[in-house]
């Protein structure tokens, strides 16, 4: 659900190996401000289980990674610069959408993978999206 009354989490997440894979245990309290005080709205306790499998073809993921490796390395570098320059970042979120940068970054990677965009121009646009989306000061 987007546009919730809560705007923060108090969370514990644990990953533990199991004989056939692993488990992911979550204990999350979603909180928000009520009358000037932080109040819990809901607590979720979730146990996800994951099983190892070899019944899949990794070829599409390997091709995607080969096409976009340099792009994602540059995106990571831009995030590191934004975080270092501003001692962290604050992301803008929009109702029913989430943060305003991720769709742009993933879309650019998809364009590279599809052959519709060269890596250098996608990197430049991604750096600008991170800079403007965080109010940061990353450089090209």
Image: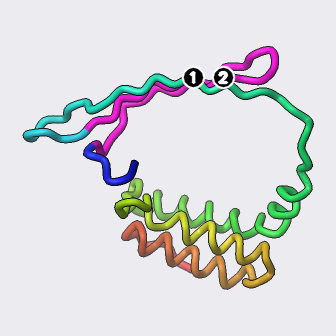
Q: Position of residue 100 (x, y in %)?
A: 44, 67
Above or below for 40 versus 4: above
Q: Position of residue 111 (x, y in %)?
A: 71, 77
At x 24%, y 40%, the residue is 32
Q: Is residue 44 left or right of residue 15?
A: left
Q: Is residue 4 magenta?
A: no
Using the image, tell me which numbered label, if any, was put on residue 23: 2
At x 39%, y 55%, the residue is 87
Please give the count of numbered marks on the rendered protein.
2
Q: Is residue 13 magenta?
A: yes
Q: Earlier in the sequence, mark 2 or mark 1?
A: 2
Range of residues picked out in magenta: 6-31
Using the image, tell me which numbered label, if any, was put on residue 47: 1
In space, the residues marked 2 and 1 are separated at their CA atoms by 7 Å
At x 67%, y 25%, the residue is 49
Q: What SS does tag 1 mark? A: strand
Q: Are marks 2 and 1 in contact (CB under 8 Å)?
A: yes
Q: Is residue 8 left or right of residue 97?
A: left
Magenta residues: mostly which secondary structure? Answer: strand
Above or below for 56 versus 135: above
Q: Looking at the rendering, which quadrant does residue 136 occupy?
A: bottom left
Above or below for 63 versus 126: above
Above or below for 91 versus 56: below
Q: Is residue 83 left or right of residue 43?
A: right
At x 91%, y 36%, the residue is 54
Query: Callout 2 environment at 10 Å: few (<14), some (14 to 19), or many (20+)?
Result: some
């Amino acid at each position: 659900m987007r546009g919730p009354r809560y705007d923060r989490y108090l969370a514990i997440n644990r990953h533990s190996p199991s004989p056939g894979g692993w488990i992911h245990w979550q204990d999350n309290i979603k909180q928000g401000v009520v009358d000037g005080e932080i109040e819990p709205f809901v607590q979720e306790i979730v146990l996800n289980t994951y099983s190892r499998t070899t019944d899949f073809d990794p070829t599409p993921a390997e091709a995607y990674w080969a096409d976009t490796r340099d792009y994602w390395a540059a995106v990571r570098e831009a995030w590191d610069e934004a975080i270092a320059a501003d001692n962290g970042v604050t992301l803008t979120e929009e109702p029913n959408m989430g943060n305003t940068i991720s769709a742009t970054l993933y879309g650019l990677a998809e364009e590279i993978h599809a052959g519709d965009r060269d890596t250098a121009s996608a990197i430049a646009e991604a750096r600008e999206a991170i800079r403007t989306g965080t109010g940061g000061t990353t450089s090209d």
